[in-house]
Image (cartoon, grey):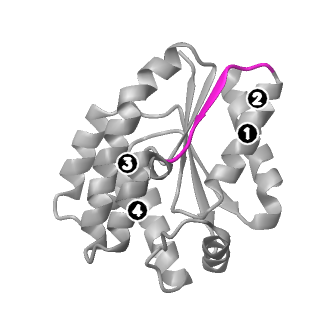
Amino acid sequence: MGLFISCEGLPYTGKTTISKIIYQYYKVKGFNVVFVDDVLDTEIGRILKLYMLNFNDFRKAIFYLSCANTIFQQNNINNILKDTDILILENYLTFQLLSTLNSKKEMDILKIFKKTIKLPDLLIFFRAKFEDIKKREKSSFSEFTLPLKNESELQSINNKLISKIDTLNLKRMIIDTSKDKEDECAKQIINKINSLLK
């Protein structure tokens, strides 16, 4: 079975760009590596994005997206790992964890969640500053916009997500990204992956 790496974090934090750098690095080294992009970039994801843009209840939209994400990923992950050295998945857990935030039954949901899905060997959580996220939003072809007003609100959500991730008892690392440090961030992650491959 291959090494399962999950790249998590809010949209526009540099996950895809950095994941592609890591993918290319291991591909050149001769590894059988697979990168599965965000469910938002699949056909069902594009439908859901449009749905979310017109949905008054963002939490409910996130819940539906998380369900679609789980089905999409779980149907593919075990088969891919059988014949792969490294599997890099983007946003395998983020939407599910977002859907539990502030829920009265969030701890029950997390317990079920932990028992029913395959957990990654390494989780990488990507953070970016509010202004960097907004810059990436503007330069993106996507119509999806994060409903965040300021840095404080962004960091509050990030902290809650990290707290949820820590309840899953995973190996994890936090990467603070910016547009001019993507190669440097990728090197940090590659060093960590190499230590797990030994």
Q: Earlier in the sequence, mark 4 or mark 1?
A: 1
SS of the residue at dot 4? Answer: helix
Q: Which residue is mark 4?
A: 49
Which label's residue is closer to the chain start, 4 or 3? 3
Dot 1, crowdedness within 10 Å: few (<14), some or many (≥20)?
many
Rendered location of residue 151, percent (x, y): 56, 82
Residue name at image x 43 percent, y 21 percent = 78
Q: How far apart are labels 3 and 1 at the CA level?
A: 26 Å
- Give the residue type at disc 2: Tyr
- Give how far apart the Cα atoms at labels 4 and 1 are: 27 Å
In-image side of 32 versus 118 (left or right): right
Q: Residues within 10 Å of mark 4 (few under 14, many from 20)?
A: many
**Residue at 22%, 49% in the rendered image:** 109
The label number, if any, that marks residue 22 in the structure image: 1
Alpha carbons under labels 2 and 3: distance apart: 29 Å
Q: Earlier in the sequence, mark 4 or mark 2?
A: 2
Residue at mark 2? 26
The region drawn magenta spans 30-38
Return the residue at label 3. Answer: 44
Tell whether label 1 touches label 3 (CB within 8 Å).
Answer: no
Q: CA distance from mark 2 to mark 1?
A: 6 Å
Between disc 4 and disc 1, the foreground one is 4
Please provide percent x and percent y for residue 157. 44, 70
Quarter of image, res 37? top right
- Quarter of image, res 63: bottom left
The amino acid type of the residue labelled 1 equals Ile
